[in-house]
Image: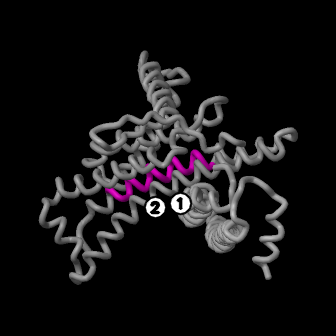
Amino acid sequence: MLSTFFVLGMAPLAFAQVDPTVAASGMKLFAAVVTAAGFGIGIAAFGTGIGQGIAIKGAVEGTARNPEASGKITVTMLIGLAMVESLCIYALVVALILLYAYPMAAPVAKMIGLPL
Amino acid sequence: MEDLGLIHQLIVPLFGHKMTFNIDVIVMTWIVIFALICFGVFATRQKSRLPGPLQVVGELFVKHLFELTEDALGKRLSKKYAPLICALFMFLLLSNWLGIIPHLEEPTKDLNTPLSLGIMGFFLTHTAAIREKGFFPYIAEFARPFFIMLPLNIVGELAKVVSISFRLFGNIMGEDLVLAILLFLAGKFLAPVPMMFLAIFTSFVQAFIFSLLTMMYIAGSLEESH
């Protein structure tokens, strides 16, 4: 059903002379890759938000108890935040690889007919 | 937007294999090196008790980073390694901030720069520990308390290199990509400007984290066995 839709949808678009069924499966692969990138970074950001929130909670409670130590607590909190953020950055790097440097980009583009 | 990922490359064929030089990154690194050498020369020109502005900045860097290194490594070893951590921090700080100047871009945007600095840190930690403790006692430390810990520790060491490099690379390249996309989407409304303030802050934090972690890995490999 979905492939019929893709085939019918691809017919009026004429990037290049390409077999429509092959183009449809190439388009499905492209859609799957982009969906994976979007969901990947979304889930990573969700976990990072919770983790960094817990870190800041600890830092603010420590400063509230002992305002004199606020300098050291702030430095430690920033280091901890950078550690947790790096996990989200790994997911971002994977998402960017999927979007921009996907290893199968050239064959898939040939399937769809995009001039790459 | 069409030339988003375009890098000028110089490909030199060498005995059947190809060497690629990323010209943009190399030229930006030269600019950073030149700026740091000029700063070093002018900051130490006339050392006086009432310092001029460049000397104040230099003393700020040296004081804080040398104190940080002494806390972690102890007085004797910090004489050897504190200048390296200070130089690493200054190089990374200027590299990450270079994107603010128009027509210049950060050399740490390419994976090669952070990865090579991470591999340098890897060799530093192991050479420092081997020099202090001897080769076989240090290798034997990986296999304590059970022998099954040996592959886990080896993977852990490689994971340290990968994590430290990808953290710096991902932050700087991600920030640059966000700025480029914001400029493409909403450049008329000066949308990238608040993001640039955030980029200044996170570039500073990432340079600090990289040098701090390198120093902590050196300290961790030099401490007494479990």
Q: Position of residue A53 (x, y in %)?
A: 67, 70
Q: Is residue A79 left or right of residue B34?
A: right
Q: Label 1 to label 2, Cα distance in Å?
A: 22 Å
Q: Which residue is painted at 58% across and 53% down in the image?
A: B171
Q: Which residue is painted at 62% across and 36% down in the image?
A: B99
Subunit of mark 1? Answer: A
Mark 1 Cα shell of 10 Å, populated few (<14), some (14-19), many (≥20) = few
Name which residue type carries label 1: Pro
Dominant secondary-structure state across the stretch colored magenta: helix
Quadrant hosting residue A68:
bottom right
Read off the residue under disc 2. Answer: B163
Which residues are drawn in magenta? B202-218
Q: Is residue A93 above or below residue B107?
A: below
Q: Is residue B103 magenta?
A: no
Q: Is residue B209 left or right of residue A32?
A: left
Subunit of mark 2? Answer: B
Quadrant hosting residue A55:
bottom right
Q: Position of residue B191 (x, y in %)?
A: 81, 44
Q: Which residue is painted at 13% across and 59% down in the image?
A: B134
Name which residue type carries label 2: Ser
Looking at this view, is B67 or A26 the one in front?
Answer: A26
Q: Is residue B123 above or below residue B156?
A: above
Q: Is residue B96 left or right of residue A45?
A: left
Q: Position of residue B76 (x, y in %)?
A: 25, 48
Q: Is residue B69 above or below residue B136?
A: above
Position of the N terminus of chain A by quadrant = bottom right
State whether residue B205 appears in this view.
yes
Looking at this view, is A17 or B62 the one in front?
Answer: A17
**Total residue callouts:** 2
